[in-house]
Amino acid sequence: MPGSASVTTGGDSASPIVFIREIIKRYGANTVLDRCSLAAHEGEILTLLGPSGCGKTTLLRCIAGFIQPDGGAISIDGADMAQMPVNRRPVGVVFQSYALFPHLTVAGNVGYGLRMRGVAKSDIAQRVKAALASVSLSGLDDRYPAQLSGGQQQRVAIARVVVLQPRVLLLDEPFNALDAKLRGSMQVELRHLIKQLGLTALFVTHDQEEAMTLSDRIAVMRAGRIEQLDRPDAIYDRPTTAYVADFIGASNTWYSRVDGGLVRLPDGQTVSTTHSGDVKVMVRPHNLVLHRASSERAGSWSGKLVFRRHVGAMMEYEVQLPDGQAIRAVGLHGDQPVEPSPSESVTLAVRNPAACMVFPAA
Amino acid sequence: MTPTALHGPFIDRLLSGRGIWPAVPAIIVLAIVAVIPFMVLLSLGFSDVVSSRGVIISQEFSLRHLKAALSDSLYWTTFRRSIGLAVTTTLLCMLLGFPVAYLYLIGGKWTRRIILVLTIAPILTSGIVRTYAWIVILGGRGVINTTLMQLGLIDQPVRIINTHWAVLIGMVQIHLPIMILPLIAVMTRHDTRLDEASANLGATRLGTLRHVILPLATPGLGTGAALVFTLSYTTFVVPQLLGGGNYLNAATMVFEQVVYALEWNKGAVTAVILMATCLIGLIGIAALTNLATRWTRAGRS
């Protein structure tokens, strides 16, 4: 399969700021990046999403220049980066645990890049002040990183790079160091901040929720290449491969055969497909509806409810089919006239057969 | 009576091994080998003893030996020489040791292993053996002179051994590993992402070295300096062997006073001055390290 086949531009016709063409990186016999191509456009937040070892951090480090790729090309703003040393690249990196200089104050950290570029002292003070104000950290100039909360450290790390007005912001799992409670609000805040500053950002994460919250587009990575690149809702609703469908959101999976262009679902409904032969059918939990077996709407696809729980306004169910397979379904709390109780017999139905995902069986 | 009534909290602590008890054996050993001899030293140096046929008749506190020492110009020149030698050795070890530690930091697995072996191996061999090795190298018929003569650069052996330079070379070589080890300890803990961040923010390699690596290694430099200063200020073997018996520093002076002149009181006073000045030197190094740390830490935005 050619490397560029999986890259879609998402309908954006502007020329890309970051353009990556068939990047290869090997460590011994291990190919970490396998002719990986990608284009990021002005002002967008593009997420590299994938499990650990998929090459997402390696790709980010190649763009920053910390490692040299074994093949392919990276250009930023039209300029080829192959011979460009790390300290001259127009990118700002926000590290996984921020890598703030522990021996420098907040002002010292934020002013570091300006100092290295030989900016006049009075200008530095002014620009540091402005940068700290833009991340709402005014007044913390003289603190040391160890005296800051995780969220504040993250904002210092961002201020430290945006003060240099980079063309591209590279963020390597910037929420890993924060506790779960803080993450959600910081994700929204970071998205607002990046948009407000008008920056282009490449963002690495293994957390799909984080990717969904932050991104304009998501590149799902697998084994050193990009499997699908699209808007978050498209990735969720129309995954192009079973791998993406499986990685993004929960799915119920079973195998079937195509008969006359149709796949028969277990509840008797059918889905049309262009595939033929053996196929893998995946359906999201929220596309399944569950009824008590005793109700008159009972259908032919039945099993035993083994577990149910409230998740906020949602009800989550786990149903065990007679063949032993566990099926997950999600509904709104209060949808059921009478909530089925565990070990009760229930029947399942697909709400919208067209939203079922059909892939060739591997 | 119940056992708990018998065991007070004190006994409980003793039996549970908490508090200072686990340290007691070490404290006893230290008291025997360090504190008691030091007391003897003090009493020898700061008292007048009248004895007859080995029997002490009277002993009272006196500053007579200290006054005699302070008014003797030989003391002043000797201590000045000792301090100069120790300070020069310390500075040279810092200057030579830091690049090795930097190489360790940026080096790969094998570079690191080689540096570790080269650093630790000399420590595992006796200082006397290493000093004799320098005699072989620096001597009149030594490796350096023979080579220089064979190359025709000199007609007759240059005097290196038994000079100030021979002592300095030996001192630096013997003490360099002591400087490198604490620096390597610092470098092992060094977070290389800080260097990447520094480069990403526009710093050159030299800039990163100056503004990130050096400031963070300052405590290691301070520790190394304190160790090297203490050891080189009080060393006896190197000046004695490479100085050929005519290089007098504080430690060789104590040796001569006690062993050759049998002047125990003089030797004791010299030793006490040596310890006191060494302590002052250590306090100075600690203060300088603090100052350097604060200087490199200054936010200077």
Image (cartoon, rainbow, N blue to C red):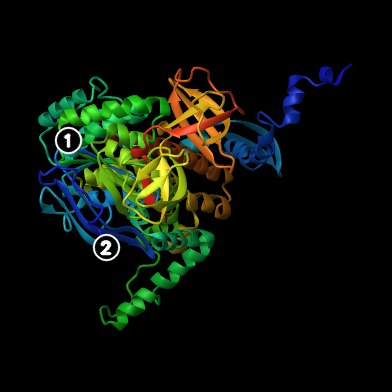
How many marks on residues?
2
Q: Chain of mark 1?
A: A
Find numbered disc 1 in the image and state the secondary structure of the residue it sits on. loop
- Which residue position holds label 1? A199
Q: Whole-percent x and y of residue A235?
A: 30, 41
Three-letter amino acid code of the residue under disc 2: Asp
Image height of A122 relative to A261, above or below: above
Point out the tag, 2 or 1, that comes first from the N-terminus. 2
- Name which residue lies at 27% across and 24% down: A142
Find numbered disc 2 in the image and state the secondary structure of the residue it sits on. loop
User: Do the residues at pointers 2 and 1 share their chain?
Assistant: yes
Q: Quadrant of the N terminus of chain B?
A: top right
Three-letter amino acid code of the residue under disc 1: Leu
- Name which residue lies at 37% across and 38% down: A353
- Which residue position holds label 2? A70
**Which residue is at the front of the view, B259 or A10?**
A10
